[in-house]
Every structure is written in C-alpha cells, then in structure tokens.
Image (spheres, rainbow, N blue to C red):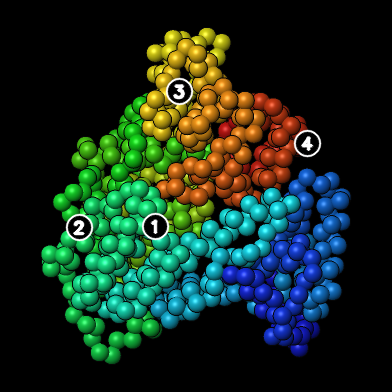
Amino acid sequence: MQPMPGVTHAAPIELSLFGSPQVLAGKRPLNLARRQARALLFRVAAATQPVPRERLVFLFWPDAPEATARRNLSVLLSQLRHALPPNTLVADSAGIALNPTLVAVDVARAAALAAAGLREERLDQLAAAVVLYRGPLLDGLALPDAEEFEIWLAQERLAWERWYLDVLSAMVEGYTAVGAYPAAIAAAQRALATDPLAEELHRRLIELYARQGDRVAAMRQFEQCVALLERELGVEPLPATRSAYEAVRDGTAAISDPPPSGVDARLVIRAPHATTLEPTPSDASHGDAVGPPGLPQPATPLIGREAELAALLSLLERDDLRLLTLTGPGGSGKTRLAQELLAQVAGQGSAEVWFVPLAALHDPALVLDTIARACGVRPAHASSTTVALATALSGRRVLLALDNFEQLLPAAPQLADLLQTLPELRLLVTSRSVLRLSGEHVFPVPPLPVPELTSLPSPEELAAQPAMALLIARTQALNSRFRLTTDNAADLATICVRLDGLPLALELAAARLRLLTPRALLKRLAHRLNLLTEGPRDLPERQRSLRAVIAWSYGLLNLQERLLFEWLAVFAGRWSIETVEELVGSPGGLPQTTCSTGWSPW
C-alpha cells in the first residue's frame, strides 16, 4: 500500500503485538475502550497486506446477516478513526490496512530483521528479532463471542511461536559454528523455556556444554531432560540423547578448542564448508539406532493401507516419476503412509531416504535451509544452499520426503529447481494442496473403507475391515479389556461410517471409548467437533482435535474458496461440478485454486 500523500508530521503510532498488546501514540499509551475495536486494530496490524472487509466481517460476526455485520464493521472503524491520529487507517478497494508511514508494528519489524539476518548471515539481526518477541501474540486478548477470531488468533500464536523457535535454532547453529558456545547455550536455553519438551534442545545443550568443557552442566542437563520427559509424557529419552549423555559421562564427547580471537560472532555467521550428507551431531544416534538415518520410527503400526502402499511402491519403481505428492484432507493419514513407504524403500536398499517435517515452518523462504539442516548440509553462505545441497546429493539416489507442505506452496518452484539440478533425486511430498509443478504425480489418500451398515458381517469379519480395525486397535491400546462383540458391533460400525473413515477422527473417537460405551459415543456424535478432542500430546496442536484440523485447512483458503464453501453448505451429500456452476451462476464456478487443492466431494 502506498504512503498517504501529504502526511509528514503526524505523531507516529507504535503497536506491540507480542506479549500483552500495547498501542503508543507519540510515546504515550493509547487506550481503546471497546475490546472489539482493539481486536480489529490488532488484526489489521498483524497482516502484511490489506485485510478484505469480507474477511473481517466473517471473523467478528460470522452468523450475523451481511448488512448487520457490515454496519457493525463501519461502527468499529469509525471508533478507531476517532481514537487514532488522522490518516492512520487506510481503506480502499483492497481492504483495511494501517498507514506504513505512520505506524510501526513489532511483528513486522521482527520478521524483517529475521529475514535479513538469515539472508545476510548476521547473528546480530537474528538476536534483535528475538528480543522483540515478548511472549505469545496478543497475550491476554480474547473474544469469547467471536469463535472465528479465536481460531485465527490461536493459529497466529502458534505460527509466531514456531517462527521464534526457528530463529533461535538458527542462532544456536550460527553461534556454534563460530565457537561462541555461551551465546549458543543462551539461545538454546531461551528456546527451551518456550518449548521445554523439545528433546532435541536438551540434547543440543548437552553437546554444547561438553564442547565448552562443562561436563557437570552437560550431565545435569540430561538429568533434567529425563525427569521432565518422565513427568510430562511418561517416556524415556531417545537413544541419541542417551548416547550424547554417555559420551559426556565416559569422557569421549568432543570438546572443541576456544574460538579464534578476532571472530565477532555477533556480526556474521561463518559456517564451516561442510557439504557432506551426514547427520548433524545433535541428530546422530549410536548403538541403539533403529532404521535409516533421518527416518522417524512410528509408535503404532499402519492399519488398512495395504492397497495404497502397494500402489505407491509400484509408482516409485518408475524411472520417469520424480515428484510424488500425497494429497488428502487433514487427518487422512498422509504422513503415516509416507513414513511406511519410506521404511519399505529403505528396507529394499534401492535409495537413501530422508524425512523432513515442515509442519512447524511457515516462511517459504526457509524451506531449503530446513531441508539442508535435516540432511546435515551446512552451506558456507545462505545464498549457496541450493549449491550445497546439489554438491552433497550429486550422484546419489535419494528419496527425500517433505511432510506438510500445504502452507509453503510459494516455495514449490525451489523444489523444481532441485529436481532439475539433481537427476537422481526424487521427492515425496505430503500436502493438502497439490504443488502444481511440471511432472508432478498426485496420489489422493482417501479415508479408510467403512462397513456397509445394511449387511453387517460377523464380528470376526467386521474386525478385519480397515476403519473398524483401526478403531478397535486404538481403543484396545487405551483399554485392554475392550472387545468387539455382537452387542456393540453395529454401534462401532456406525461410528466408523459417521466419521467417514477418517483415521484421525477414529483415533480421537477411540480416546473417548475409554470412558463411553460405543452407544453413548454414537449418541454424542452430533456434536463431534466438541467431542473429538484431546488427541495425543506428541501430535501437533492442529491435529489434537477435529476442530483444529478443519480450522488449519480453512485458514489456508483464500476468500474466494471460503465463499465457495459457504455455497456448498446447502448440499447435504454429494454434488457435481455442473451443480455448483448452476449454483454460482456462471460456467467454471469452482475457483482454480480450489480445483487444485486435492480435495474432492467423496
């Protein structure tokens, strides 16, 4: 948005959105009486582009008639214009925004500093960015009567927290590269204060303490990690963490020389020239490692995906297939299927396999750096990441899995560049949207087949059907006394049908079957979004409830796609493209972006 003409002497506005929100006008606090007005200001300030009026109306009054909602928005905008200095709010055909010549927002400043720091390899800019993070976004702000705003706010808080942790991680690696171990330790401790259950941070601290020769601190860090994991999750540390501890205990941990004099780690990241594809020290495991490096070990067996797995293995045998994208709705099991596929390929020894989780990443500019870090590649300069990956992977047959790519679609052309540079590289991508790249092969991952309620087989045969098998297995894992019987078979089968065979929904339902009988659960499924919650703690927040899964997908849609879903709400069952075109009132009624997202009205 262009600066407002003729405005040069108005008092500047400073908005702090990290932590408890604050508005300063001319260095003095500015109080806005109405909570909705404050929320509107902060929502507009958090955006990098003008926010369309339709989106604001939906966030604050989704159930109100459109005329009423627009009138409410006009009232709030009028109140803000009276409370703020002249020309602070800018409204045009694109939407509502703040005048960038008059308003400074901490989130925008932090994002710019971090981007510049990564691009220019400057640790001082990364440090300045994290200093601006005073706590969760808009901490303490709540609009209980505006559920859509609350969903948006929860997503934004999570996204900024992950951004903060990503920047701290870059600082840890940067300081480590120049031997500034106290600074690296301070950054790791700061990250651990936000995410205390991140075992990789505990492991990194053990290694950093060892590098600077503080054996006592390293062993104490391991003890804290053990106690925390046992108390909060009831699990033991990973073999890699225990190996790091044992190396310190036995005196075999590497202790680096002090950094050379004259190196100013506050200014520039000077990474070593390592371009070999090896696990980094923090990811390496010893002795007890199971499976190939870089491949996670699922906690539960894959159920009901034999046909899909066989089809995918057959596809990967084709030499002309370089990019394979697993698509499907949230909770359909794309990640779990990809993990099993990688394990099968690794077992065959036909290629090296690497798994790169991207769910916590929200900045497309960091995709290549994240891939490089996961593969143990440390480029000499940020601008040379592609070159470093090309050098490390050249001549090697590698299957690289990129998990949860849907929020990073602008980075898709970078994947095309990698494939062009490395003819032996193949990519396996999981995403709720297709990448729309040349040569992409799309494999939809459907829900699990559900029983036919009109002719239920015997309990033994019913238990072998995919959706039922998953529901029973997950329920018995939580309640060993649970059994499929002739009395509960029909109710369990109906639950599978009502949940459309969606694996995540079935797992969440299994958690409820610890306390509810199948019939009692079935009666409550009319309110499934409120019922199917409290998923496993080791899952991302967006997969711990059915509502969160839907909210994540909905948040990735543009305005046109959201309006389309409002129109589709009139259908109780299946629909066709021709029907939608008639509903919309013009040929080609489906938005092009929606047609490429990989979802379908099954």
Q: Which amino acid type corresponds to the residue marked 4 in the rendered image?
A: Gly
Label 2 and label 3: CA atoms lie apart by 40 Å
- Residues at marks 1 and 2 touching, judged by CB atoms closer than 8 Å: no
Mark 2 closeness class: few <14, some 14–19, many ≥20 residues within 10 Å: many
Mark 3 closeness class: few <14, some 14–19, many ≥20 residues within 10 Å: many
Vertical order, 332 against 353 (above or below): above
- For the point 63% across and 52% down, which residue is it? 151
Q: Horizontal and vertical percent for residue 266? A: 38, 83
Which of discs 1 and 3 lies nearer the camera? The answer is 1
Which of discs 4 and 2 lies nearer the camera? The answer is 2
Compare marks 1 and 4 and give the one earlier in the sequence.
1
Which of discs 3 and 4 lies nearer the camera? The answer is 3
Label 1 and label 2: CA atoms lie apart by 18 Å
- For the point 67% across and 74% down, which residue is it? 22
Label 1 and label 4: CA atoms lie apart by 52 Å
- Residues at marks 1 and 4 touching, judged by CB atoms closer than 8 Å: no
Residue on which disc 3 sits: 468
Tell me the quarter of the image containing the N terminus: bottom right
**Secondary structure under the numbered disc 3 in the rendered image:** helix
Which of discs 1 and 4 lies nearer the camera? The answer is 1
Q: Horizontal and vertical percent for residue 405? A: 47, 50
State left or right for residue 335 relative to residue 78.
left
Mark 1 closeness class: few <14, some 14–19, many ≥20 residues within 10 Å: some
Decide which of 236, 240 is in the foreground and name it: 236
Residue on which disc 4 sits: 585
**Secondary structure under the numbered disc 1 in the rendered image:** loop
Residue on which disc 2 sits: 243
